Amino acid sequence: MVGDTGDYGQARRPDASGHRAVAQEDDVRVEAWAASRENCLAEAVAAMVECFADVSGVRPTGVGRIRLDEASDDDLLASLLDEILYRLEVYGQVPVDVEADEAEGGLDVRLAVAGLTDVRVTGPVPTDVAWEELRIGPGPYGWSCSVTIDG
């Protein structure tokens, strides 16, 4: 499951994971990092959720699955976050915990979800994932990604 948030400015260990969000004028820049691509993607989901909701202490009321076909890493990041926004808009589901695993031919994501009415909303609910300056990739301390979420 996703790790704790941390200070991105501190020296990172190869096995460290975390995320943060930086508010900008009309949107939020989400950054995430982890030892593997899959955990980095899960951290990105957690960071996006924290932009608008406090899910600490919230018990999930359901489980969801997302199966994404193999694509470029950038496409996987955008597709996963778009799917989270879709489920939020259509079903009112907010992920309170996320696991992502590489699967043959793609990515398998499991979500522990709660209803939007069950979480404390702390900001505007995001509406879109911006492709501009979206990036994900490996580095000396594992994987990292950054993406802008429009509010």
Image (spheres, grey):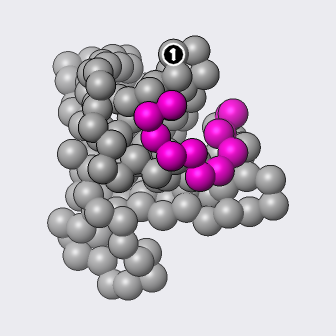
Quarter where residue 109 is shown: top left
Q: Amino acid at mark 1?
A: Tyr
Evaluate whether residue 47 shows in this view: yes
Rendered residue at 35%/29% (across/down): 113
How many neighbours does mark 1 have within 10 angstroms: few (below 14), some (14-19), or many (20 or more)?
Answer: few
Q: In this view of the protein, which residue sits in the foreground, 98 or 36?
A: 98
**Quick check: is 83 in the magenta stretch?**
no
Rendered residue at 30%/77% (across/down): 12
Quarter where residue 42 is shown: top left
Residue furthest right as drawn: 25
The image shows residue 87 at horizontal and vertical percentages of 50, 21
Q: Quadrant of the C terminus?
A: top right
Residue furthest bottom as drawn: 10
- Residue 7, placed above or below residue 104: below
Q: Name the side, left or right, on which 41 lies relative to 62.
A: right
The image shows residue 80 at horizontal and vertical percentages of 46, 30
Rendered residue at 41%/52% (across/down): 137
Check disc 1 and report the residue beneath it: 91
The image shows residue 103 at horizontal and vertical percentages of 20, 24
**Badge 1 element:** helix
- Residue 90, placed above or below residue 79: above
Rendered residue at 22%/31% (across/down): 102
Q: Quadrant of the N terminus?
A: top left
The image shows residue 144 at horizontal and vertical percentages of 41, 58
Evaluate whether residue 134 shows in this view: no
Q: In this view of the protein, which residue sits in the foreground, 43 or 95?
A: 95
Total labels: the figure holds: 1
Q: Name the side, left or right, on which 13 lies relative to 92.
A: left
Q: Which residues are magenta?
A: 117-128
